[in-house]
Amino acid sequence: MGYNTDLGYCLFVVFTYSLISRCRTNMGNNITVAVMLPDNYHKYPWALPRVFPAIIMANENLQKKHGVLQGHSIQLLNFSTEDSTGVCAENKAQIIAVDTKLYNKPDAFFGPGCVYSVASVGRFASHWKLPLITAGGTAYGFVNGDEYKTIVRTGPSTTKLGDFASIIHAQFNWTSRAILIFHDVKKDDRPHYFLSEGIYIILKAENVTVDALPYQDSPSYYKEIITFMKDHGRIVYICGPPDTFLKIMKLFQSEIPDPENYAIFYLDVFAESLTERKPWLNNDSLWIDPIKVFKMDFIAGCFYDGFVMYAKALEDTLAEGGSQNDGISITQRMQNLRFWGVTGLVTTDKNNARNTDFNLWAMTNQESGEYGLVAHYNGTNKEIIWSSTERIHWPKGSPPLDNPPCVFSPDDPTCADGHLPVLGIVAVGSGLALIIFGISSFLIYRKLKLEKELAGMLWRIKWEDLQFESPNKYPKKAGSRLTLSQRGSSYGSLITAHGKYQLFAKTGYFKGNLVAIKHMNKKRIELTRQVLFELKHMRDVQFNHLTRFIGACIDPPNICIVTEYCPRGSLQDILENESINLDWMFRYSLINDIVKGMNYLHNSYIGSHGNLKSSNCVVDSRFVLKITDYGLASFHSSCENDDSHALYAKKLWTAPELLIYDRHPPQGTQKGDVYSFGIILQEIALRNGPFYVEGMDLSPKEIVQKVRNDQSPYFRPTTDNSCHCEKLTILMDSCWAEDPVERPDFSHIKIYITKLNKEGSTSILNNLLSRMEQYANNLENLVEERTQAYLEEKRKAENLLYQILPHSVAEQLKRGETVQAEAFDSVTIYFSDIVGFTSMSAESTPLQVVTVLNDLYTCFDAIIDHFDVYKVETIGDAYMVVSGLPVRNGNLHAREIAGMSLALLEQVKTFKIRHRPQDQLRLRIGIHTGPVCAGVVGLKMPRYCLFGDTVNTASRMESNGEALRIHLSSATKEVLDEFGYFELQERGEVEMKGKGKMRTYWLEGEKTDVYVI
C-alpha cells in the first residue's frame, strides 16, 4: 500500500532558515500562528526546516492566489520541539505551547507532528479552544471529538488506512480472522505502532478476530513472527522498516510449507519499498534517500494545504460575525471540506481528518518478479477502483481463506475423520432448505408489506383538507395565550422575545376533529427513504403519554405537522399560573407522566426527543400529561444562528455537551433528554421558571454561556430542600450531571419516582378523581379572585367617569339613557387666568410649564372640593368653574362661587413656583351670573359643555379684570347682596367687547362681624 499523489514536491526544498528569522520580525499582523515542529531534517517528515518554508509560501499566496483574508495579515512564529538528542520531546512541546499562549496569544497552532506531542498540546488547544492543524498525529485516538475537539489532521492517518483494510476484507470476503505484525521499540514516537492501530481497531469493530504481535530487529523475533503466522492467521499485515520486512519474507519462504494459503500486506504509506520494481534485489541502502525527499515534501504540502484550509475557515467565521479566536467554530468549518490543494484533491471528514487515497501493489509479473499497481482506493468515496490491465495472481486462482476449516478450530466435530451417513446428509440438507425457505418467505412478506406502507403515504394530509373554522361555525381563535382553560395548543409553545409568555401553534379541524398544527421553517421536504421511515415510525407511536401523530402536510409553502390537540395548555403555563394550587400528589403525577412518556420514547425507533422542555409537555382534557414535538428530525430546521433572547431561552433545557455546537442535531441524545428532565424537575419543585438561580438575575444568554463553560464548579439551578424532599434534590443533581455517563436512564428514574411517590400508587380512577377535585377547587378560587378584581376595576372606572362628567350625567349614561341638553335659569360662572403667563412660558422649558400648571391645578382642585361647584375645564392657564348645575341650588350658586374665588385668591398668594421661587403667580378672576344651556357633546372623549351669553360675559369679566382681584358683574352683585356678608366695591362702568359699557364690582372679601346662617 502507498499514498497516491502525482505532484512534484521538490518546490519546497529551495527555502532555508533565512526565511524563518525574517518572518519573526513582521510585527504588523493581526492574526498570530505558532508553528511547533522538531528540527531534525532527516528523521522527521514534518521537520521545521522543510515545513516552515511551505507555510510561508502559503501565507504569501493567501491573498494574491487564493483570494482569502483580504485586508488581514498573519504573523508566523516558529519553535523547535525536539530535545538535545534530536528527537521529539513531549514535555518541551507542552512548555512551548503554554509559554506561547501566555506571551504571544496565538490564534492557531500548526504542529506538532509527533503523536505524543500532538496528544499533549492537543488537549491544551482544545481547552483553550484554539485550532491545532498538523499533517502528523497519525494515531487513532485523535478521532475523540470530546478530548481533541480542535485538532485538524491534513496528512495520512491510521484511521483511513483501517478503512482501506476494511474495504479489502469486504471485497475478498475475509470476515473472520487477520493478524497484525508491527515494529515497535517503545521509544521516540513509535510510528509503526500508531500507523497500524487503525487496522486493528476498525477490523475488530467489524467482528474480525485480529491478533497483534510487536517485534524488533532481532533473529529471535523473526522466528517468533513465523510461528505466530502459522498459529493465528492467514491474512497478514506487516508494518515496519523495509529492511526488516525483507528479512521476514526471506524466513517466510523457507519456513512456511504452504505460502499459497497466505495473503501478506506490507503497510508502506510513503512508498519507501517501491522505488524499484524489485526492491528485494537492491542491497544499496542509498535508494531510500530520494524517498525521504518525497516523503518529507509531501508532508510539507499537507501543511501548506492545511494553512489554506485554516485561512478559509477563519474568513468564513469572521464573515458571519465570529472572532478569530473562536477555535470551535473555525474547526467545525473545516469539517467535510473539499478543495484542490498543492497535494491534489483535499477532502475532510466529520472528525476533521483528511480522506486519504491509497494504492495497492502486487507482483503482476510472475516471471520477472516485478510489482504493478492493481487497485486504487478513493478515500473520499471509500471505494476501490481495480486496474483494467493489472491484477493479483493468486497461486490457487482465488484469494486464500481467512479462516480455513480445521486449522484454527481443530475441536470442531466436523473436522473428525469419517463421513456422515447419506441419509443424515439428506435430512440435514432438507431441513436447512426448509428453514431457509420459511425464513426467506417471511422476510420477503415483511419487505413487501413495508414497501406497501411506505408507498401508501397514509400520513399525508393535503392543505385544503385542513379547516380553520369550526364545522359548527363557532369561531375559534388561534395563537392566544392559554393556561388551564379549554383553549390551547398541543404542539409546543414558543417563548416570545419579550417575556416568558407562550405563543401556541395554530389549531384547526381535520375530518371534523380539532387538531394542533405546527408550521415548519422549511421551504420543501424531500421524500427520501429516511424521511419516509421517520414518518412511518411516527404513525406507529401509540402511547398514552405521547401526543398522537395524525399526519403531515408537505405542500409548499404550507409545510406543517398535525398532531393530537390537548386543550389544557402546557406544563410551563400551569407552573407559571400562580392561581393554580399544585399539591405534591398532583406534581408527582405530572412527573410520573413525563417519565413514562420518555421511557417509552427512548425504547422506540425514535430513540430520543432532543427538545424536551416544560412547554413541550401538554395536558389533555383528562389532565394526563403528554410529551409533544418529538421525532421527525428531517422536518426541523437547524439554521438558528441569531443571537436573540428567544433563541437562548429555548436552550435553557439543553445539555452542556450539546451547547458546544452552534447547531446541535435536532434528534438530540438520550442523556441530553435526562438533563432536560432535571431542569423540568426544578421547575415543578420551585415554580420559579426554568433554570431559577437564587440571588442572581441572569438573562438566558448569560445562563447558557455559564452552562457551556465546562469548568468546575458547574453552573446549575438552585435546589431548596425546604420546598421539596431531599431525595428529589438527589435525583435532580444526578440528572444534570456534567458527565453524561453519570446520568441515569429513564427506566431507573421511573423506579426512583415510584419509591418517592408512594401515595400516588393508588388506582387510575382515584388519581383522576383527585386531579378533577383539585382542578374544581382551583376554579372556585380563580372565579372568586376574578370577581373581586372585576369589582375593583369597575369602581376605578366609575371614579374616572365621575371625574370626566357630572355624577348625575354619568349615572344617566350608565343606565343607557340619552343625555338631553338642559336649560338653567340662573347659574354663576367663574373664569380665571394668570397674568404674564405667556412671557413666563417663553422663559421656561415645556416641562417646567407643565409642572407649574399641574401643581397649581392640583391645589385648586383640592380647594373646590369644599364648595358646591363643578369644574368644567382647564385650557392652558384658563380655569372654568360653575355652580348651580347640573343640580340646581337656588341662589346659593353665587355664594359658592364667591367663597371659592376668595379661597383660591388667598391660596395663590402663597403658591411657590418650583423653578422660579422668587416670583408670584398673578391670578385674575371674573364672575358672572345668568342663564345657560348644558349638555354632553361628542361620543369619543365626551365633554359636558355650557352654552349661552352668560359664558361669554363671564369670560369678558375675567379678561377685563386685574391681577390678584375678583371682578364680578352687577347680576352677581345683586344675588350676593341677598346674603349680606360680602364686601363689594364698585368699579364703575367698564367698556366690554361686544357688550358695551357695563357696571362692574370688585369682591374684596367677607364681613367678619356678620353671623351667617
Image (cartoon, rainbow, N blue to C red):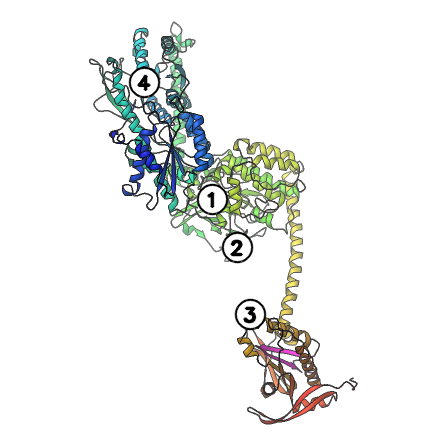
Q: Nearer the viewer, mark 3 or mark 2?
A: 3
Kindly identify the amino acid type of the residue bearing the numbered disc 2: Ser
The answer for how far apart the CA atoms under marks 2 and 1 are is: 23 Å
SS label for mark 4: strand
Contact, mark 2 vs mark 1 (Cβ under 8 Å): no
Q: Nearer the viewer, mark 1 or mark 4?
A: 4
Residue 867 is covered by the magenta coloring: yes
Q: Nearer the viewer, mark 3 or mark 1?
A: 3
Q: Quadrant of the N terminus?
A: top left
The answer for how far apart the CA atoms under marks 1 and 4 are is: 56 Å
Q: Quadrant of the C terminus?
A: bottom right
Q: Which of marks 3 and 1 is nearer the N terminus?
A: 1
Left or right: 282 in relation to 1008: left
Pick the residue in front: 752 or 315: 315
Numbered range of the magenta stretch: 866-889
Quadrant location of residue 63? top left
Which numbered disc covers residue 265? 4
Kindly identify the amino acid type of the residue bearing the numbered disc 4: Phe
Contact, mark 4 vs mark 2 (Cβ under 8 Å): no
Q: Which of marks 3 and 4 is nearer the N terminus?
A: 4
The correct choice, above or below, for 869 with respect to 245 in the image is: below
The answer for how far apart the CA atoms under marks 3 and 2 are is: 40 Å
Which residue is label 2 attached to?
Answer: 480
